[in-house]
Every structure is written in C-alpha cells, then in structure tokens.
Image: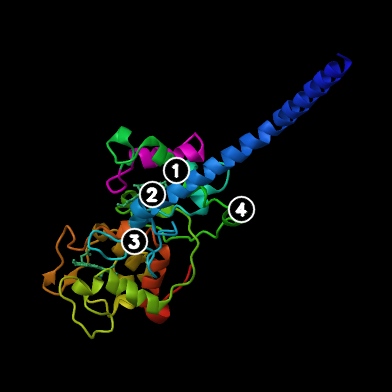
Amino acid sequence: MQVKVVIGTVAFMLTMIVLGYAALREPTRLEDFAGAAHGRSVEQGAYLYINNCASCHGIDGTATSGEDNGCRDANGDPNCLGLPLNNYFLLCGNPPRRSIDLGWEGTTENFIKKTVAAGRGAIMPAWSNDFGGPMRPDQVQNVTNYVLNWGSEELCAEEPITFPWPEFGPGAAEAFQSLTDPVEIMAGDPELGAQVYLSNGCNACHGLPDGTAAATVGPSLTEIATNGAERIEGYSAQDYIYESILAPNAFISPECPNGPCTSPSLMPGTFALTLSRNPQDMANLLAYLMGDAYTHP
Ligand code: HEC
Ligand code: HEC
C-alpha cells in the first residue's frame, strides 16, 4: 500500500516535470518551427523569382544589365526592364524611400506584396490569382519573402550616394518622374559605354560616333560633344545628350541624314525605361559620347 503511494507520487511528479519542461520548451519550438517555415518560404520564393522575375529585375535583383544577369527585353536583348529590388531605397530605412515617394503608408512587406499581386504600370504584370495572374496568394507571399530577404544588415548599413541627374527641360519632366530615384553610380567608362550603345541599337540609326559607320535615320553623333551645347539654351552638351536619350520628343534636332528631323521623333521613347533604371549604363554611355569632355557630376 505504502509502496504504491510512493510510486504513484513519484510517477505524478515525473509527469509534471516532463509536462512542465515541455511547456517551457513550447515557445522555442514554436519559434524554431516558424523559423523553418520562413526558411522554406524564402526558398520557394527563390524558385518563383528566378523563373518569373529575373528576366526583368535581374537574377541578383539589382536590375543591372551586363554580365549575364538574366534580363531580356522584348527583342531578347539583355536589358532589365524592371526596377532594382535588391536595393537600399526599397528595403532599408523606416519607412524606405520608395514607400515615401509613392505615398505608401503600410509596411514594406505589404508594399511589395501588393505591387507583386496587382502589378503596376504597363510592364510589371499582376501575379496573383486575385488579379488574374498565375500565382496563388501563398506563392505571392513566398516571392515577397524572397525579395525582403535582400534587405540584409549589409545592404542597409549605409545609405548609398545619390547621383544628381541633370535637370530636365519642361517637356521632359513628367515623362519619367521615376528618374529622380537616387542611385549609387561611378564615373562613366567609355568602353563599357560603347557596348551600351551597340546593345541598345543606337548605331542602327546614328551610325558610329567615330564616323566609321554612317548615320541613317538620326543625326550623326560624331560632333555631339560640342554641337550638343548649341541646341537648347542653357544646356551643356552632356545634359542635352542625356535628355535626348530619355525624352526624344522634348526637343527635335534640326538636321537628320535625310533632311530636317520629323516630329514626333523617330527615336524610340523606350530608353527612359531601360537606361534610367540602369543609371550606370547611362553614365557609361555619356562617357562614350562625350569623350574627353565627359564630366561626372
Ligand atoms: C516584364 C517585366 C517584369 C517582370 C517579369 C516582373 N517585373 Fe516587377 N516591375 C517591372 C517594372 C517595369 C516595374 C516598375 C513599374 C512602375 O513603377 O511603373 C516593376 C516594379 C516592381 C516592384 C516595385 C519596386 C519599386 O521600387 O516600386 C516590385 C516589388 C516588383 N516589380 C517585383 C516583381 C516580382 C517579385 C516579380 C516576379 C514575380 C516581378 N516583379 C516580375 C517589370 C517586371
Ligand atoms: C530608330 C532610330 C533611332 C534609334 C535606335 C536611336 N535614335 Fe537617337 N535619334 C533618332 C532621331 C530620328 C533623332 C532626331 C530627332 C530627335 O531630336 O529626337 C535622334 C536624336 C538623338 C540625339 C540628338 C542629336 C542631335 O544632334 O541633336 C542624340 C544625342 C541621340 N539621338 C542619341 C541616341 C542614343 C544614345 C541612342 C541609343 C540609346 C539612340 N539615339 C537611338 C533616331 C534614333
């Protein structure tokens, strides 16, 4: 009888100890579980990203063309049409600069999720089933978690230097407001600029600036570093080239190879989308076209 009571008491105490221990452990187990679930979500998001987003935003999310960052435009050329996502101004700061600029009052997570779900503008598709896109809401969440994952301590450690793009003439301003997005940028490299010139097909209309191929549709650019300064009152040649590329209709050049240039411009307006979002490409292109007269702002 006595023995039974003792065994009973000991068993009861052991049970309580085990239960108590389990209860104490529960929050950590929940955390581990949540951590593992988040990890799986980011991993799933990575697959979704590479297959669906890298073609416009780049494999590394920086939307920089060059190397092979996976970007392809409608012609199959390696231009990134999307905005940089692996980017200080989207992911760092409280709230990040992009949220402020676009008047978003919610969290960064919801900003990204909403943009991905519903799409934005003419190029960024809607991805969620809810908006007629191909992804389930949990997939939108996964790819959002993957993008957020870039907001590392390292990325957010220091605010990048901003590049003071030249001012624009009145006609150009509204056409590409997003150009005021601050980005880090080095002095242009003319050799890389030559590649940007060719990969964007500038040569098809303007020939080559060294004169070895003649201009056909647009003006020859052999003298642009000097005569560019004569086109618009108050513009340096470099500002003029910059604006001509981004907003061809802001000013129509006087002389084209087959007579006066026509209005609207025959030059595509799409470079504002591609080059403004890859400002290093633009700096390189300016260095190429300006030669020794190039100045890095
Ligand atoms: C066909 C090209 C294209 C594809 C594919 C694409 N995007 Fe975009 N994305 C864009 C463009 C262009 C914008 C800028 C839209 C605007 O502001 O007009 C953009 C904007 C965004 C933004 C907002 C960035 C900011 O700073 O405001 C996010 C976030 C984003 N895309 C995520 C994604 C994700 C995630 C995927 C894959 C599921 C994806 N995009 C696929 C072209 C694309
Ligand atoms: C489809 C033909 C075409 C392509 C491609 C093209 N342009 Fe043009 N470009 C023109 C035409 C036509 C004009 C003159 C009308 C105007 O002012 O927009 C022009 C004007 C210019 C001017 C002003 C020249 C001056 O003397 O006033 C510059 C600078 C320029 N383009 C640079 C470029 C660069 C750099 C590229 C590639 C990123 C490019 N263009 C691609 C047709 C083209």
Q: Which residue is drawn at 35% across and 37% down?
A: 136
Q: Does the magenta stretch include residue 25?
A: no
Q: What is the spatial separation of the Cα atoms under label 2 and label 1, in whole angstroms? A: 8 Å
Query: Type of residue at label 3?
Result: Cys
Residue farthest along the right direction in this orientation = 2
Q: What is the spatial separation of the Cα atoms under label 3 and label 1, in whole angstroms? A: 21 Å
**Mark 2 close to ligand 1, CB under 8 Å:** yes
Location of residue 62 with respect to 138 vertically, above or below: below
Query: Type of residue at label 2?
Result: Leu
The residue wearing badge 4 is 153
User: Which numbered disc, 4 or 3, marks the residue that appears first in the sequence?
Assistant: 3
- Depth check: 37 or 101 in front? 37
* Mark 1 neighbour density, 10 Å: few (under 14) some (14–19) many (20 or more): many
Numbered disc 3: secondary structure? loop
The residue wearing badge 3 is 71
User: Which numbered disc, 4 or 1, marks the residue that appears first in the sequence?
Assistant: 1
Q: What is the spatial separation of the Cα atoms under label 4 and label 1, in whole angstroms? A: 21 Å
Q: What is the spatial separation of the Cα atoms under label 4 and label 2, in whole angstroms? A: 24 Å
Give the percent coordinates (x, y) of residue 192. Answer: 39, 76
Residue 142 - label? 1
Q: What is the spatial separation of the Cα atoms under label 4 and label 3, in whole angstroms? A: 26 Å
Give the percent coordinates (x, y) of residue 29. Answer: 64, 36
Q: Nearer the viewer, mark 4 or mark 2?
A: 2
Query: Type of residue at label 4?
Result: Glu
Q: Are marks 2 and 1 in contact (CB under 8 Å)?
A: yes
Q: Give the range drawn in magenta.
A: 104-125
Query: Type of residue at label 1?
Result: Asn
Numbered disc 1: secondary structure? helix
